[in-house]
Each structure stands twice: as C-alpha cells, then as structure tokens.
C-alpha cells in the first residue's frame, strides 16, 4: 500500500477499522488531475482492492478543495490522436470497478473530472460550501470521463442538461436537493462524517456489501427483468457466506453478530 511518500500526490492518509482514507494532495493546482495524479490514483485503488485489511475507501481532497478538474494545462494544445493515445480510461477503470464501497468526502470545488471522480464513488458527503459542476462546455469541451452518463443517471435529464449545458456551479444544498450528493454537513465535519459512515459500513458483511454495489451498478444498465434476475442470483449466492449464517444465528440468539467477511 502507498503511504505518504513525497513526491506522491495521492496517498493513504490513514487506515483504521478497515477504512482507508485516500488523500489527493496537489494544492498548488487545486488538486487538478494531471497524468501523475491519475496514475497514482489508479495504482492505489488497485492496491486497496487487493488489500484484505481494507473494507471501505474514503476519497478526499482535503479541507479546501476536492478536485478542480482534469489538468487543463496538460491537454490545452493536445491533438485528438494524442488524447486517444493517453488512454485515460485505463486510469478510471480501477476506481469505476473497485468492488469495495467508496465514499467521497468533498469540500470546496468538485469540477469537471473532479465531479466525475466524485460520481465514481458510491456515497458523497459534501461540506456545506462544496460546489459541483461540469464546466467543460466553457472550455469548448464536454465531459470525457463519464460525466454526461453518470450525471443523468444521478439527477435525471432536466437537471443534468442544465448543469452540462451551462457549466454552472451547483452549491452543496442544491446538489443534495437534486440527488447529486448523499449528505451535506458543516465543512469541518466532512471527513469526520465520511469516516464515521465508512466505519459503520466496514463493520458489516463485506461480501454482502460487494454484491449490493455490483448489483446496483450493473443492474442500472439492464432492463428491469434482467436486473431482477441479477439481484436474485446475488441474493442466493450470499447464502453461501459465513456472514449470512452468523447474521441469522445472531438474530435468533439475540446477540450481536460478529462478521468476518469470509465465504
Ligand atoms: N487544471 C489546471 N490547473 C488548475 C485547474 C485545472 N482544472 N484548476 C485550478 N488550477 C490552478 C490554476 O491555474 C492556478 O494555478 P496558478 O497559481 O499557477 O495560476 C491554481 O490552480 C489556483 O487556481 P485559481 O487561482 O484559479 O483559484 P480560484 O480560487 O480563483 O478559482 C477555480 C478556483 C474556480 C476552481 C478555478 O481555478 C477554475 O475555474 N479552474 C478550472 C475548472 C475547470 O474548468 N475544470 C474542468 C476542467 S476540464 C475537465 O475536467 C475535463 C474532464 C474530462 C476527463 C478528463 C480526461 C483527461
């Protein structure tokens, strides 16, 4: 696992109770995602996915800013072929396909690629002064890392179109009202709340959590009947896990369950 090792701009800030807090730390550029940050993020997510000590990941940019977007200076004069050859999708895949629950703790700006990064997460906790947006249109661009697709799935067509077509910034309370974030808290409580939620989730059966995540995300792209089959199969598969037996036994014996995440 990558701990803080300068000049690393992405590192595990803490690992406690099965919760790894991943910090993006590039303050001079408002945590903009340059190639190095994207690569480090991908490598870290791959490593955390493999790490049995990690049940839940909290992703944060710190107290002031989440991520102000892809690094504009890095792609300002790129040609289409250069953009193609960068194969940026490789760096998003380990985050998109991380089977473990991922919680974004967002303070400040989550713009462009930063908003897309937050939307890769399963739960978003926002500080009250956080601001979300997809301002690519103001650069003559459009989102290129899932922003059009994840945003419309999160908030519906009419809010998504407004946000994408104007490039406006959406304040945290409004983001909560339209379903773009899970909770809004005072700025100084964002990480604390995200960690508390992560610890609560970390104590629950890990295989059930992984099947919930997989079924919600995979099912959203399927016709209802197919999605329901997927759900039913995942539900049945969980009867093969020790935690399912433990959960039922603990309920019947009126005691606290002790989950071990084993199959
Ligand atoms: N890229 C590169 N540098 C940035 C970025 C960015 N996205 N955002 C901020 N910075 C830099 C600034 O250039 C500045 O650097 P310097 O001191 O050297 O001039 C430093 O961070 C501080 O920024 P500001 O002085 O601008 O700080 P303010 O508090 O005045 O403003 C803002 C903060 C509002 C966040 C402002 O910086 C801003 O508008 N940033 C750009 C936001 C944006 O347009 N984001 C979208 C980028 S496009 C994108 O994300 C496409 C994603 C598609 C997927 C990508 C795959 C490659």
Image (tube, rainbow, N blue to C red):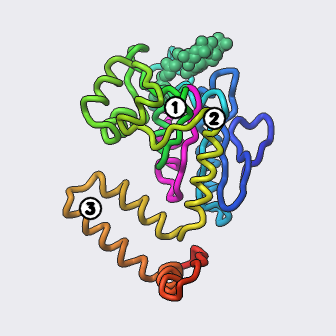
Q: Residue at x 68, y 28 (%)?
A: 26
Q: Residues within 10 Å of mark 1 (few under 14, many from 20)?
A: many
Q: Is residue 39 above or below residue 35?
A: below
Q: Read off the residue under disc 1.
A: 114
Sequence-wise, the earlier of marks 3 and 1 is 1
Question: Mark 2 or mark 3, which is nearer the start of the sequence?
Answer: 2
Q: Which residues are magenta?
A: 85-108
Q: Give the CA distance from mark 3 to mark 2.
A: 34 Å
The disc label shown at residue 61, or none:
2
Asked whether the viewer can see residue 31, the reply is: yes
Q: Is ligand 1 less than 8 Å from the beta carbon at label 3?
A: no
Q: Is residue 96 magenta?
A: yes
Disc 3, SS: helix
Crowding at dot 3, Cα within 10 Å, few <14 / some 14-19 / many 20+, comes out as: some
Instruction: Indicate whether residue 119 is drawn in magenta.
Output: no
Q: Are marks 3 and 2 in contact (CB under 8 Å)?
A: no
The Cα atoms of the two marked residues, 2 and 1, are separated by 10 Å
Residue 199: mark in rendering:
none
Tag 3 near tag 1, CB within 8 Å:
no
Residue contact between numbered discs 2 and 1, judged by CB atoms under 8 Å: yes
Left or right, residue 48 beside residue 122: right
Image quarter for ligand 1 equals: top right
Q: How many marks?
A: 3
In the picture of the structure, the residue carrying the numbered disc 3 is 227
Task: Identify the residue shown where x is 57% and y is 29%.
Answer: 67
Q: Is mark 1 within 8 Å of ligand 1?
A: yes
Observer able to see residue 82:
no
Residue in view at x 59 percent, y 34 percent: 186
252, 105: nearer the viewer: 252
Which residue is pictured at 65% across the width and 45% down the height? 192
Q: Position of residue 23 (x, y in %)?
A: 67, 40
The one nearer the camera, 235 or 91, is: 235
């Amino acid at each position: 696992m990558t701990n803080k090792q300068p000049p690393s701009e992405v590192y595990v800030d803490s690992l406690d109770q099965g919760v790894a807090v991943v910090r993006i730390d590039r303050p001079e550029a408002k945590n903009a995602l340059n190639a190095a940050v994207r690569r480090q993020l991908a490598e870290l997510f791959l490593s955390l996915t493999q790490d049995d000590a990690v049940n839940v990941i909290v992703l944060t940019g710190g107290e002031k800013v989440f991520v102000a977007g892809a690094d504009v200076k890095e792609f300002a004069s790129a040609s289409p072929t250069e953009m193609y050859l960068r194969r940026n999708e490789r760096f998003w895949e380990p985050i998109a396909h991380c089977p473990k629950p991922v919680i974004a703790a967002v303070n400040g700006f989550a713009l462009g690629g930063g908003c897309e990064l937050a939307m890769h997460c399963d739960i978003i906790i926002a500080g009250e002064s956080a601001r979300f947006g997809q301002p690519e249109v103001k650069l003559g661009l459009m989102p290129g890392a899932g922003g059009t697709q994840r945003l419309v799935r999160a908030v519906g067509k009419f809010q998504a179109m407004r946000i994408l077509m104007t490039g406006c910034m959406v304040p945290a309370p409004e983001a909560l009202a339209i379903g773009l974030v899970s909770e809004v808290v005072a700025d100084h409580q964002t990480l604390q709340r995200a960690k508390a939620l992560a610890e609560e989730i970390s104590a629950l059966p890990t295989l059930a959590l992984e099947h919930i995540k997989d079924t919600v995300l995979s099912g959203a792209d399927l016709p209802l009947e197919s999605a329901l089959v997927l759900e039913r199969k995942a539900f049945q598969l969980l009867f093969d896990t020790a935690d399912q037996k433990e959960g039922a036994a603990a309920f019947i014996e009126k005691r606290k369950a002790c989950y071990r995440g084993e199959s």
